Structure formats: C-alpha cells, structure tokens
Image (cartoon, coloured by chain):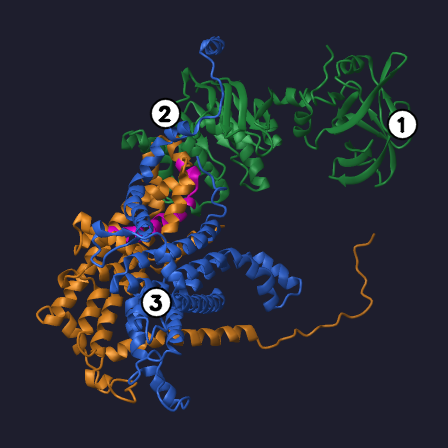
C-alpha cells in the first residue's frame, strides 16, 4: 500500500529535533511581515526618533540664539537647574495644572451628560449629535478668534448680553484681566473638546447590555441606581481612555492661549507649552526650551504608559495567525 | 478525492504544545471527526492541515504530495468555518464563484459550476442575496456550496454546526452525512460535540491536551475506550467512573470501597486488574449496563439516589456510589425517589476497568 | 396534584405609580442648554460676518444685523482683489497640503495597520506602542529638531516640510484607527479566501480592502481635518506669504492693523466650511472610527 510505503520513507528522512526557535530565527521567519510596517517605521524614525534624540541632546547644551549648532556649549544640567529654580516655572506649572484639571473635568462632565441624554432614540438625535460635534472638528484657530470676539472688552457679545440681562453693570473684561483670563480660556477649551468625550462615551454606552439594565429594573433599582451600579461600571474602560486622552490633550494645549492672550496678561494664561514656545522661539533660549521639553517628555511617558495599557487591553487575546 | 496522512505533527506556541506528535491516516472517501473539549488541539490540527498556521515539525500528506510548505491555496482543500466566513460584501453567487475566479476559470464555466452546486444544495433562489439576508441554515448551505464548487481533494470542516439551533443542527447533521455519501468525499470534521462525531463519522479521533488519545471507529471507541478521558468524553450520559481499591482473598480478586462493601471480579476481569500498577483501580460502567434493585441481592452494592430525570421513554437516575456519581437508565415503570437506598448490579462482561494511576484501560492479555 | 389554583380572595388591582419622569426632563433641559452653549459662538460668528465694520463696532451690539451684507465674503473670494488673492492662495495651499498628507498617510498606514492587526512578529508590541506614544507629545517638542531637519533637507518654506511633519501625527492616528477596523474583520474571512485559492495579498485585496473601506474613509477624514487645522508647524516653518496655509494666513492677514472683525469672522467661517461639510456628510464613519479602538466588545 502506498501509504505504508510513504510512511516508511518518512522514517528515513533525517529526523526533526524539536527545539524552541531563537529570537533571531523568529525575526527571520517573520521577515515578510516587516515589509508591511517598514514604510511607516521609516517615516517614524526620521521624524520622531531623531527629534526626540535631538531634543535630549540640546537640553544639555547652551546653544546660541542663531541656532548655529557648531557653537553650542555643553553645560551639564544647568538648563534643568535654571528651570527648577525659576519662580516662573512654579507659576506656569500651577496654571497648567488648573487648566488641565478643570478643562478635563468639565469636558468629561458635559460629555457624559450629553452622551446619556443622547443615548435614548429620538427624532433628530443624529442631527443634534452632529451639531454638538462641530466645535471639535473646526480648527482651534477659528475657535480662538470667534471666542476672542465674543469676549471682546468693548463690543463682545457675552459682556453686552450680561449687561442687558441685568446681571452685571458693566461689560466684564474676560481676557484682559489676569484674574479671569485663565478661566475664560478654560471655557473655550471645554467648548472645543467636550464633544470628544461625548462621542467616546456614547460608544461606551452602546456596550452596556440591555439585559443587565432590565435585570436591575426588575430588582427594583431606580434610574440613578441603574446608572451607578450598571451603566457606570461598564463605562470605566472607555472613561479611562477618554480622561487620559483629555489630560494629554489639555496638557499639550497651545493654540487657544497662544492666539487669544499670548500667555498674558502678565503671564496669567501661560501654560507649559506656550511657555516653552516663548522660551525657544521668541527668546531663543534653545537649551532651556529643550530641557522643558525633556521634562514634558518624562511626564508624557508616564501618562503614555497608562494610555497604552488602557488602549490595548484585550488586544493580545484577539486571533492572529 | 484523496487520502490525508498526518505524521508526527507538532505545533508549539513558545513552550506550549498545541498539538503533539499527532499521527493519523484519513483514507480516501473517509469521514473523520476530530473531537475533544475546547483547547484540545483539534482546531489547531485542522488549521495545520489547511496550512493556515505553519507546522513546527512533522509532515502532512494530501494525496501523494507532502504539503508542509504549500500555501493553503495550493493544497487542493476546501474549508467550512464555524462562523461560515461568507464574504459579507459579496452576493451568494459571488461567494460561490470566488474560489473559481481565483483559479481563473472561464466565466461561463464558473456560472455553470456555481449553478450546479446551488442546485445540489437547494440554494438557487438565494443566489442574488447577501449573506446577512440569509438564515443560519441558509448561510451554512452557502458555506458548504463554496467548498463543494471547487471539487477539492479534501473537505475540512471546523465546527460547522455549532452556530445553529438544536433542531436545525440535527437536520444539517443528516444533510452533511448525505453530502459525504453522495460525493464519496474525504472529510475532516472538527467538533466538540461527541454526539456529532459518533453519528456522522466513519472514524473519530479523540484529542485532549494536544495529544491524540484514540483513533478508531465510533463503535470501537465507544466499546473499548483506551483511557478514562475517552471513556468519560464519548457517550451521553457519560460513563460512570468509580475509584475503588483492589483486594484479594483466597485467590479471589475484588474491588472494595471505603464504605466497606466489596465487588468480586470475574475471572476475566481479575486477569485485567492483575496488570494494574497499584491497587487503585477505577470501575467504569455505562448507564445501560447497570441494573438497579430496590432490595439487596447477591453481587449488588449499595447506593443512594441523588436525582431522577424522567425523559419519557427512559428515566435517568444519578446515584452516589462510594463517593462517585453513577448514571443509570431505567424503564419509566420503575419509580425511585431522591435519597432512596438502592442496590446496583454491574454486568461483569460489560464493565470497564482503568488503572487508577495511569488512567489507562486495563486489558486482559 | 391538581392543576387548579385556588384564590382565597379577589385580586386587588394595584395602581401604577406614575411620577413625572424627572430624569428625562433633566436630560432635555441639559441638552437644550448644551446646544445653546455650542451654537452660540458659531451663530455670532455668522451674524458678525454679515455686518459692516461699523455695524460690528457698536455698543450695545446689533443682535441681528440691521442691514446684512455679504460684502465680507465677496472680498475674500474675489480673485482680483488683493485680499481675495491672498485668501484664495491660502485656501489652495491648505487644500494641497491636507490632501497630500491624507493620501500619503493612508498609503503608508494601510499595510502597517494590517500587519499590526494580523501578524505577531517580534517587536510588534514595542513598535505599536512607540507609534501610539507619538500622539502623546505636543508639536513643540518636535519643533526645533524638525526645523533643523527641514533646514538640512532644504525643505524650509516648502509644503513638503509640512506634509512630512503632518505625517508624524497623521500616521500614528491612521495606523491606530485602521488597526481597529482590521481587528473587527474576522480573520476567518481571509483564511477562507486563502483556502479558496487566494494568495495572502489577494485575500487582502479582494476581501479585506473592500470591507475596510469605511475605515479608510474615516481615516482619510481624520488626516484631512488634522492637517487642515494644523497651526504650530505651519506658523514656524513657513515665512513666505505665498506658501502659507489658512490658519496661519488669516492671522497674519488681519492683525497687521486694527482688526477687521467682520472680515475675520467671514474668513473663519469659510475656513470651517470644508471640514464641517466633510464631517457632516461622513459623520457615521468618523464617529465609528474614533470609538472603534477605544471600545472593545
């Protein structure tokens, strides 16, 4: 019989000794897979790895204003010492924290409210969702100009409306006043990004099983209890990702303060990124700017760790050949 | 059609064996079921045959070719997937035509073959629909059609019935069996449901933990399970397994329980237990081979009724015997109640004996 | 046993408690206020853009323009006027940079995302995390080194510098979004195709690509909007007027003298039109893509 002969032939073939492939062998076996990612990796190497390396290097040097690299001088950790001993650093950091925390908190809160209100099917729901998302898609530059005009100290619509409604006697100086400027900008920022939280949480709400909500209803839970015991725990994953993304986004904000107030008045709306920009590009203190960027890098890596972890949960469990 | 030979097939993920030294021969025209609990390596084995995952070592022969290094497309196989894997953006016709299109057949021939297959499976009226517009059973037929249209050497089926409801599953089961008989097709069929394997397959390969446990006809597997795993996996309700101790007095071997009773063994069974590696022996018996008595009789052992499940023509009883649960079937005329004391009689010619250490069946040779 | 049930007394009909649905009303009121908050600035942008400079600078403001005019728009869109010429140039610059970025990002991201979704090659996780992490960093970190890099490559003051730079944030996002889509396409479809006689590439091309069209559309919108709205790099890399994109252009344009608010509002309106239209038309793809990766089923 042919099958028996065949099997006999097999025995004569030099036997395979099973052993775990080495790392090098694994790479070699996957060589075709790398072709798919090679173009992306190449672009990322040039425009990401190199700049990060370069920024770290620059942070240990004193580089002339002309950015003439041949004349840069090594000065150890002087740039870092300069930053950490400067009173401006602490002021800017505090403002950055206020900006980030308040923006994130209110954007998430409004987004959650909107997501819950829009979760029920009703006529015009898609339209409303689209409308609420517009601030998020238009450019921050456009938004900044529009709000700057709304906040205008003489002809601003908000100030005038408050006077006409009898709430204040005179138009409020929203952004030309160091006590209210930061909070006024936070309103703009929340306006711009709350719908991002909304859309993420709307998707999260769709994963809440109806059967669980019905079970809770049968068990006698009122709407608030149903939200707190069923809906909210289901949103924890997507909430984590959303809040992390909002924190990162807010920490990295630039356009709104830069265009609306330029960090003023008297530095009251200066946050990390606008401050770094000012140090590097307006005052040409490249080394200090780079050192700031490295500190930022460290903070972001920490946040990034949690971001990646939250984002890739369950990724490994998916099928793959 | 062709035969398939698996020779010392190994698949590892890191240091974990998904399939270990699997060797079996599927003869031309044979219907073989790979069966086992989830994670036993049956789907891995099927995917290795299909070429969807690379083998770590061993050989796969389809027809007269060693196909280890061939792409799936060159192995002359067709596969039916658990979730059918119908291309959602294509109509039923386009789904059936796709394998032929990939082989660059002329258009009129594709059309002819697709209609032929559709006719065989009675899906001609569905040809212009999209998969999502079909019921589960219809999707199943389209998936079969897509395999059939190719006229492949081997059909591979990965739990094709598990997404259907119970009634449809029984119906499709007989249709696939019919399909096999009409085409005289070589089929390798993966299922976790031993009943599907027993009812449909010419031979069944029982797998567990990546290892092939037993490969034989369903009747032989049922009658002579090689170890406790196969014994408990094949058959429903499962074979009852009662761990006992081997004792002998006056040259007479017996199985004794911690409760104090003992069951003398026949001469043939005594020869079997002589090969046990220790005095731990497991008694196995199928539900239909155990007699239930309401009073103590010679050769019976005491048990206590746990549950009673009348199904109409048969009543299934579970009872505690020496700490283990035993399944017994009774005619409905016999009425027992939970917690009732009963006596069980085992048919010495039809009990199974297993080595309590190695879990292997004890044989009388 | 008997199948009858015995009622000892007449059943009592219990009235359903019907309170006002407070939660539903709270939701409606909240939503109304939120819509007002969202629309108000856009509304005022449009109203202002329909006024003359004189009408805009009044206190109290004209809540509705006394004599609405489209002059601001005509001025911006007049290719013969100096204002219109510059504005239209910025507009086309933005369009070119955004489209080029989008096409390149999708072309490079499609194979990469597919590989990250399907293959398990050594270093996969590291590379994927590295790519994801890119979006954690603000533009400012990359500004100086990229500026130097562009100087070395001779790309300063060219659109090439922007396109290359925009890829740094467009690409990671595109890869992440597309991977989310590929993850949701059952791998059995490709396996079926490969058994049906397709090569890996054919399986990708005939089966996966058509199924991921929504993902590609969504990714394209994202890349486009991201590039269209980008400000810092354009502001830093471009110093020549004829190269500028809209966000930078309109700024330089209107702050030279006293600000022409109605003109600026008209310009921000026109600048927002392409992204808002694109977004509203393709909203469902856009929303799905964003949430795909974040919400695992």
Chain colored blue:
A
Q: Chain of mark 3?
A: A
Where A273 falls versus B199 (above or below)? below
- Residue B317's x, y, as percent? 78, 36
Mark pair 2, 1: CA separation = 64 Å
Q: Which residue in the structure is indicated by mark 1? A: B260
Q: Quadrant of residue C245?
A: bottom left
Is residue B32 located in the magenta-colored stretch of the structure?
A: no
Q: Secondary structure at mark 1?
A: loop
Q: Which residue in the structure is indicated by mark 3? A: A134
Tag shown at residue B283:
none
Chain colored orange:
C
Q: On the rendered image, what quadrant is the C terminus of chain B found in?
A: top right
Q: Is residue A127 visible?
A: no
Counting the numbered discs, the total is: 3
Tag shown at residue B74:
2
Q: Nearer the viewer, residue A296 or C292?
A: A296
Question: Which span of residues is magenta-colored?
Answer: C163-190
Q: Nearer the viewer, residue B354 or B106?
A: B354
- Residue A283's x, y, as percent? 26, 64
Q: Quadrant of residue B238?
A: top right
Q: Are marks 3 and 2 in contact (CB under 8 Å)?
A: no
Q: Nearer the viewer, mark 3 or mark 2?
A: 3
Q: Secondary structure at mark 2?
A: helix
- Residue C155's x, y, as percent? 17, 51
Q: Residue at x 40, y 27 (%)?
A: A25
Question: Local crowd at mark 3 within 10 Å, few (<14), some, or many (≥20)?
Answer: many
Where B265 falls versus C99 (above or below)? above
Chain colored green:
B
Query: Mark 2 or 1 closer to N-term?
Result: 2
Question: Local crowd at mark 1 within 10 Å, few (<14), some, or many (≥20)?
Answer: few
């Amino acid at each position: 019989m042919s099958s028996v002969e065949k099997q006999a032939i097999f025995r004569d073939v030099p036997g395979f000794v099973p052993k775990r492939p080495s790392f090098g062998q694994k790479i070699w076996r996957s060589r075709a897979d790398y072709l798919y990612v090679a173009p992306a990796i190449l672009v990322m190497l040039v425009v990401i790895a190199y700049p990060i390396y370069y920024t770290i290097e620059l942070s240990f040097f004193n580089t002339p204003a002309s950015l003439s690299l041949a004349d840069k001088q090594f000065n150890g950790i002087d740039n870092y010492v300069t930053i950490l001993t400067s009173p401006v650093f602490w002021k800017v950091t505090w403002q950055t924290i206020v900006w980030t925390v308040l923006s994130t908190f209110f954007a998430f809160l409004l987004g959650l409210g909107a997501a819950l209100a829009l979760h029920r099917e009703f006529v015009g729901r898609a339209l409303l969702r689209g409308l609420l998302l517009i601030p998020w898609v238009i450019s921050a530059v456009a938004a900044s100009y529009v709000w700057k005009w709304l906040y205008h100290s003489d002809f601003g619509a908000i100030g005038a409306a408050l006077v006409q409604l009898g709430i204040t006697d005179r138009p409020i100086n929203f952004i030309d006043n160091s006590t209210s400027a930061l909070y006024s900008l936070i309103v703009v920022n929340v306006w711009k990004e709350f719908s991002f939280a909304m859309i993420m949480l709307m998707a999260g709400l769709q994963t809440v099983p109806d059967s669980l909500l019905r079970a809770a209803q049968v068990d006698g839970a009122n709407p608030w209890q149903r939200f707190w015991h069923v809906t909210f725990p289901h949103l924890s994953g997507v909430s984590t990702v959303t809040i992390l993304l909002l924190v990162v986004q807010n920490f990295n904000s630039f356009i709104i303060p830069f265009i609306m107030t330029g960090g003023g008045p008297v530095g009251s709306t200066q946050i990390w990124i606008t401050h770094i920009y000012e140090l590097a590009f307006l005052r040409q203190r490249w080394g200090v700017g780079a050192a700031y960027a490295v500190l930022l890098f460290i903070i972001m890596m920490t946040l990034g760790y949690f971001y990646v972890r939250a984002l890739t949960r369950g990724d490994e469990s998916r099928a793959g050949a | 059609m062709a035969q398939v030979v698996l020779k010392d097939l190994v698949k590892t993920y890191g240091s974990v064996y998904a399939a270990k030294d699997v060797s079996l021969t599927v003869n031309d025209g044979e219907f073989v079921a790979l069966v086992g609990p989830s994670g036993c390596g049956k789907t891995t084995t099927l995917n290795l045959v299909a070429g969807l995952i690379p083998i770590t070592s061993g050989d796969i022969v389809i027809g007269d070719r060693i196909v280890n290094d061939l792409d799936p497309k060159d192995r002359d196989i067709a596969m039916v997937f658990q979730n059918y894997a119908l291309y959602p953006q294509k109509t039923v016709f386009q789904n059936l035509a796709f394998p032929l299109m990939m082989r660059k057949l002329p258009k009129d021939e594709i059309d002819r073959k697709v209609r032929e297959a559709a006719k065989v499976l009675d899906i001609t009226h569905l040809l212009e629909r999209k998969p999502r517009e079909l019921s589960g059973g219809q999707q199943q037929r389209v998936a079969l059609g897509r395999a059939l249209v190719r006229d492949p050497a081997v059909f591979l089926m990965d739990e094709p019935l598990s997404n259907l409801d119970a009634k449809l599953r029984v119906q499709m089961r007989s249709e696939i069996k019919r399909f096999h008989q009409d085409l005289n097709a070589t089929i390798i069929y993966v299922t976790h449901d031993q009943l599907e394997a027993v009812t449909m397959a010419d031979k069944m390969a029982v797998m567990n933990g990546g290892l092939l446990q037993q490969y034989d006809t369903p009747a032989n597997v049922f009658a002579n399970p090689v170890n406790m795993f196969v014994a408990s996996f094949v058959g429903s309700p499962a074979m009852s397994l009662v761990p006992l101790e081997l004792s002998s007095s006056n040259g007479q071997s017996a199985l004794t329980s911690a409760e104090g009773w003992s069951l003398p063994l026949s001469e043939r069974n005594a020869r079997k237990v002589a090969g046990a590696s220790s005095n731990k022996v497991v008694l196995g018996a199928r539900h239909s081979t155990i007699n239930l008595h309401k009073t103590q009789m010679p050769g019976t052992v005491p048990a206590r009724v746990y549950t009673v499940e009348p199904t109409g023509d048969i009543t299934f009883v579970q009872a505690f015997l020496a700490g283990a649960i035993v399944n017994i079937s009774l005619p409905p005329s016999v009425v027992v109640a939970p917690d009732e004391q009963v006596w069980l009689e085992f048919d010495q010619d039809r009990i199974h004996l297993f080595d309590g250490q190695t879990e292997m069946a004890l044989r009388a040779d | 046993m008997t199948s009858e049930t015995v009622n000892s007394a007449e059943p009592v009909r219990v009235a359903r408690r019907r309170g006002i649905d407070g939660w539903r009303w709270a939701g409606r009121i909240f939503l109304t206020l939120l819509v007002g908050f969202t629309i108000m600035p856009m509304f005022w942008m449009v109203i202002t853009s329909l006024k003359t400079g004189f009408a805009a600078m009044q206190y109290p403001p004209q809540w509705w323009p006394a004599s609405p005019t489209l002059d601001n728009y005509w001025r911006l869109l007049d290719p013969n006027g100096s204002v219109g010429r510059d504005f239209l140039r910025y507009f086309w610059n933005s369009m070119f940079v955004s489209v080029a970025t989008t096409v390149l990002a999708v072309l490079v991201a499609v194979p990469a995302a597919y590989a990250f979704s399907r293959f398990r090659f050594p270093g996969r996780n590291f590379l994927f995390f590295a790519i994801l992490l890119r979006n954690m960093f603000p533009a400012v970190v990359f500004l100086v080194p990229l500026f130097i890099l562009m100087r070395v490559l001779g790309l300063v003051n060219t659109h090439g510098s922007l396109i290359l730079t925009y890829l740094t944030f467009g690409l990671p996002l595109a890869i992440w979004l597309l991977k989310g889509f590929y993850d949701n396409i059952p791998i059995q479809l490709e396996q079926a195709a490969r058994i049906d006689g397709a090569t890996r590439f054919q399986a990708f091309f005939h089966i996966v690509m058509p199924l991921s069209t929504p993902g590609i559309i969504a990714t394209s919108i994202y890349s486009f909007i991201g590039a269209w709205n980008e400000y810092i790099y354009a502001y830093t890399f471009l110093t020549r007027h004829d190269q500028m994109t809209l966000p930078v252009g309109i700024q330089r344009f209107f702050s030279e003298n006293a600000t022409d608010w109605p003109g600026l509002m008209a310009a921000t309106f026109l600048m927002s039109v392409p992204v808002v239209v694109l977004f509203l038309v393709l909203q469902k793809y856009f929303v799905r893509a964003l949430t795909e990766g974040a919400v695992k089923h």
